[in-house]
């Protein structure tokens, strides 16, 4: 059974809803999946998973959340994640997805296979958006 880690930071719950839908999709596809907030996640657990999903909304001015998620990602990006599938996801509002483009290019250096170009949803995810998240979870479980 594939072990999948979903780790996210979410201020108002939009990215958290995406995280839960990714977990639901992964479990429906038969994977074992943990879904936790970045403030209680372990870099070791994440790096030892078969597939990984990391979520954070656009914050600051098109950056990751700086006190918890950015330091977590700084540790994760030091790891060799070759052979692992990695999904990046998050909610945004007024931007054009710049934070996600930058995040995807950072994470490519880990050697992980990035699913698509990051899954971004404007504000509160609707049912169609949640369905895309469940599909991403299924793909991570393959
Ligand atoms: C402090 C702050 C900074 C933000 N910066 C951006 C930004 O640079 N670009 C953008 O598109 N949205 C920005 N947003 C909007 C959030 O990304 C958006 O509200 C998102 O849905 C929040 O997701 P969450 O509910 O998971 O926290 C910002 C929101 C806050 C509170």
Image (cartoon, rainbow, N blue to C red):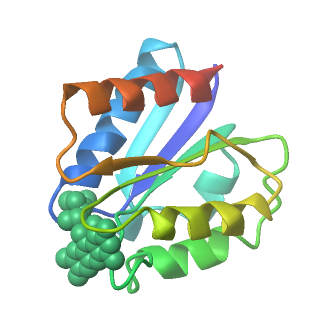
Return the residue nearer the eye: 113 or 51: 113
How many numbered marks appear? 0
Q: Determine which quarter of the picture holds residue 74.
A: bottom right
Identify the image quadrant of the N terminus. top right
- Indicate which quadrant contains ligand 1: bottom left
Return the residue nearer the eye: 130 or 84: 130
Question: In x, y percent, where is residue 95?
Answer: 34, 68
Question: In x, y percent, where is residue 48?
Answer: 70, 49
Relative to 37, residue 73 above or below: below
Residue at 21% over, 52% down: 14
Q: Determine which quarter of the picture holds residue 86.
A: top right
Q: Determine which quarter of the picture holds residue 21.
A: top left
Position of residue 116 in the picture relative to residue 21 (left or right): right
Position of residue 92 in the picture relative to residue 14 (left or right): right
Relative to 142, residue 88 above or below: below
Residue at 83% over, 60% down: 80
Question: In x, y percent, where is residue 98?
Answer: 49, 69
Return the residue nearer the eye: 92 or 114: 92
Residue at 64% over, 25% down: 2
Identify the image quadrant of the C terminus. top right
Question: In x, y percent, where is residue 70?
Answer: 49, 79
Position of residue 37 in the picture relative to residue 85 (left or right): left
Residue at 46% over, 22% down: 135
Relative to 46, residue 75 above or below: below
Position of residue 101 in the picture relative to residue 64 (left or right): right
């Amino acid at each position: 059974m594939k072990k999948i880690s979903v780790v996210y930071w979410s201020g108002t719950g939009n990215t958290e809803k995406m995280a839960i839908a990714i977990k639901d999709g992964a479990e429906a596809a038969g994977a074992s999946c943990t879904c936790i907030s970045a403030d209680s996640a372990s870099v070791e657990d994440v790096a030892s998973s078969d597939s990984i999903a990391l979520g954070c909304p656009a914050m600051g001015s098109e950056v990751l959340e700086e006190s918890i998620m950015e330091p977590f990602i700084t540790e994760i990006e030091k790891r060799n994640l070759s052979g692992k599938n990695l999904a990046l996801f998050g909610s945004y509002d007024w931007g054009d997805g710049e934070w996600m483009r930058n995040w995807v290019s950072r994470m490519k250096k880990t050697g992980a296979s990035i699913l698509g170009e990051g899954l971004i949803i404007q504000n509160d995810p609707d049912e169609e958006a949640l369905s895309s998240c469940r599909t991403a979870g299924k793909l991570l479980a393959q």
